[in-house]
Amino acid sequence: MADPHQETRRLLDRRATLLRERIHHIDPTAARRDCLLDTGDAAAAAAAETEQLALRDRARDALHDVQAALHRLDTGDYGRCVYCGRPISADRLDAVPTADTCTECADPATNRSTDTEDT
Ligand SMILES: [Zn+2]
């Protein structure tokens, strides 16, 4: 039987590869090394280092999300909300292939923890 999520899996695999490459090539200390001769640039180097660390953290978070989505594809849980178990809409998965919640559970205004019907 054909994998109904074959295209999604290919896209997520490709995204994971790109994110791993990005993480591998981010060198937070590069700016500091490059301006060793000009100590006046120390503050700029520190700022650049902080920015690179933030970029690496974001890439790692994104990779984690992609790997989690690939795992859900393997277990057959892809496309189901991790909170309520309802199907996640195709539109949402098209926009956010790593989505693990339905729009209702993802929306703080309708968050299940405040899910109280009118009395
Ligand atoms: Zn949900």
Image: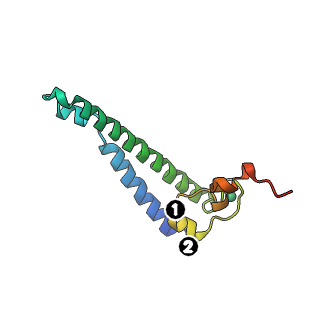
Q: Secondary structure at mark 1?
A: loop
Instruction: Check the image and name the residue furthest to the top.
Output: 39
How far across and down, in percent of the image, does residue 69 sit? 54, 55
Is residue 81 found left or right of 60 in the rendered image?
A: right
How packed mark 2 is, by other alpha carbons closer than 10 Å (few <14, some 14-19, many 20 or more), is few
Which one is earlier in the sequence, the residue at label 2 or at label 1?
A: 2
Residue found 49% across the figure and 63% down from its top: 9
| Whether residue 102 is situated above or below residue 38 in the rendered picture | below
Residue found 76% across the figure and 53% down from its top: 115
Of 107 and 23, which appears nearest the observer? 107
How far across and down, in percent of the image, does residue 19 sit? 39, 51
Q: Which image quarter is the C terminus in? A: bottom right
Whether pointer 2 and pointer 1 mark residues with C-beta atoms closer than 8 Å, the reply is no
Q: Secondary structure at mark 2?
A: loop
Q: Quadrant of residue 102?
A: bottom right
Q: Quadrant of residue 17?
A: bottom left
Whether ligand 1 has any atom under 8 Å from the Cβ at mark 1 is answered as no
Real-space Cα separation, disc 2 to disc 1, in angstroms: 19 Å
Q: Amino acid at mark 2?
A: Ala
**Residue ID for mark 1:** 97
User: Within the displayed image, which quadrant is ligand 1 positioned in?
Assistant: bottom right
Residue found 38% across the figure and 48% down from its top: 20
Of 116 and 70, which appears nearest the observer? 116
Instruction: Check the image and name the residue furthest to the bottom.
Output: 1
Q: Which image quarter is the N terminus in? A: bottom right
Residue 2, numbered label: 2
